[in-house]
Image: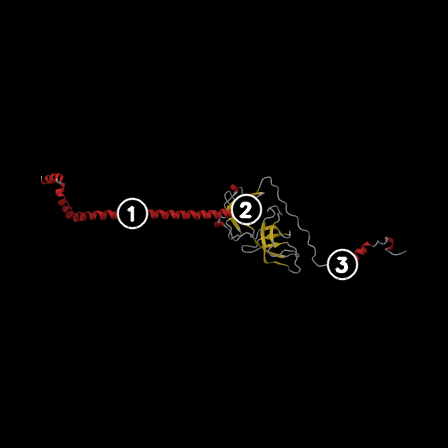
Amino acid sequence: MGALTLMAVDYRHSDVLRPIRTASLMLVYPLLVSVDSPHRFYNRTAGFFSAQTQLALENAALKEQIQTYAAQQRVLSSVQQENSHLRAMLNAAPSASYTFSLAEILEAANDRVRGLMLLNKGTNDGVHENQVVLSGENIYGQIVEVTPFSSKVLQLIDRNHTIPVRSQRTGERALASGAGRGQPLEIKNLPSNSDIKEGDIFVSSGLGGLYPPGFPVAKVVPQGVEFKQGAPSATVKAAPLVNYEATRDVLLIWRKPGVPEPQPLPAPEPKRSSKPVTDEDKDAKDTKQADDRKPEAPARQQGGTR
């Protein structure tokens, strides 16, 4: 009843009770603040931890996104490097007469003692025995064994491998034989008066019909040419142009249909003597030519008169 009376008086005479309300509010305010403090503290703390949790989640998501982008960038960089490598290989290989297919060397199944490498391409991919294998423009080896899903390639450095070659500079023909891993190729059948020098490049000659002509094979190493007195042939060492330790991909090649088989280049003319011509040689030559111009005596006079 008293509350109702105060409400009625406050409604009709608000100005009269305003000082009382103000004083009462000032007295009660500290109590209201103290009562509300735990609630405000809880809300602020909850909001803080909620914000921290949200920030932590966002931070974790951003870190994951950054790591994802970094991984994608690494993959992209790797793909770009691989594409550049493949483009370099394809650009290096002559493409007018051939088609190519990239094959990967399977490291786990290699016989490095013999120089036999396993590839991830087989008869299902059109691979066949005696097929030529390249690394860029350089000859890597030949296929010696094929299954539906894989094949084995014999490297040039294998002791059982020999390839007909010719000097790119002089045209001299020879045979390049493997001498084992880490050893240069042995260039055989060169004459003792050969003009081969350090740095000369040997390319496939095309003889034998297995390797097409003109593909780089090996380069004569420093001090790789030796001429022994009285020996019928020169001793030449040439390093293969393929880096067998670093190569991970190779090119299988096929001749395009309808393209004629390339013919080996003719052998160079026999090397003439490089001995300088002296005045005595010229006089002897002139005397011989004068003798050749003299008329021959009749046959009956060769035995004397009767």
Residue at mark 3 = 282
Q: How many marks?
A: 3
Q: Nearer the viewer, residue 158 or 69?
A: 69
The mark nearer the N terminus, 2 or 1, is 1
Mark 3, other Cα within 10 Å: few <14 / some 14–19 / many ≥20: few
The mark lying in front, picked from 1 and 3, is 1
The mark nearer the N terminus, 3 or 2, is 2
Residue name at image x 87 percent, y 55 percent: 301
Residue at mark 2 = 91
Tell whether label 2 touches label 3 (CB within 8 Å): no
Tell whether label 3 touches label 1 (CB within 8 Å): no
Residue name at image x 43 percent, y 48 percent: 73
Residue 221: quarter of image: bottom right
Q: Position of residue 142 (x, y in %)?
A: 56, 47
Residue at mark 1 = 51
Question: What kind of element bears circle 2?
Answer: helix
